């Protein structure tokens, strides 16, 4: 996968993890202020995910998105 595409895919993967973390945190929170935090995390993750998916679509429309997404390459370390 090209570095430009890999970076976009990394953002998409990170947003997925942020959404999962916000859901987990919300289910396990003990006070309202934590709920505010997880709401902010969720909101930001959705905004970033939307932007990354739009950029991915632009790359696909240009024909520069390569679909050989290997998670070990997309998420080194």
Image: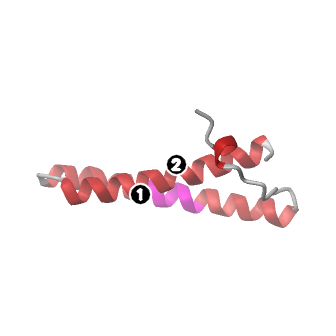
4 w.r.t. 52: above or below = above
Quadrant of the image occupied by residue 65: bottom right
What colour scheme has been applied to the protein in the rendered image? secondary structure
The rendered magenta stretch, by its main secondary structure, is classed as helix
Do we see residue 39 in this rendering?
no
- Relative to the observer, which residue lies in front, 20 or 64? 20
Which numbered dot is residue 56? none
Residue 45: x and y in percent read: 46, 55
| Residue ranking furthest to the top | 77
Residue at 65% of width from left, 43% of height from top? Answer: 72
64 w.r.t. 75: above or below = below
Of callouts 2 and 1, which one flags the residue occurring earlier in the amino acid sequence? 2
- Relative to the observer, which residue lies in front, 28 or 33? 28
Q: Residues within 10 Å of mark 2 (few under 14, many from 20)?
A: some
In which quadrant of the rendered image does the C terminus lie?
A: top right
Residue at 32% of width from left, 59% of height from top? Answer: 23
Secondary structure of the residue carrying tag 1 is helix
Which numbered dot is residue 14? 2
- Relative to the observer, which residue lies in front, 18 or 67? 67
Quadrant of the image occupied by residue 43: bottom left
Residue assigned mark 1: 19
- Per the rendered image, the range of residues in magenta is 44-50
């Amino acid at each position: 996968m090209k570095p430009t595409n890999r970076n976009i895919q990394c953002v998409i993967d990170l947003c997925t993890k942020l959404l999962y973390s916000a859901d987990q945190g919300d289910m396990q929170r003990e006070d309202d202020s934590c709920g505010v935090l997880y709401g902010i995390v969720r909101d930001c993750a959705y905004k970033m995910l939307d932007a990354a998916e739009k950029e991915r679509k632009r790359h696909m429309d240009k024909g520069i998105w390569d679909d050989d997404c290997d998670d070990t390459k997309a998420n080194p370390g």
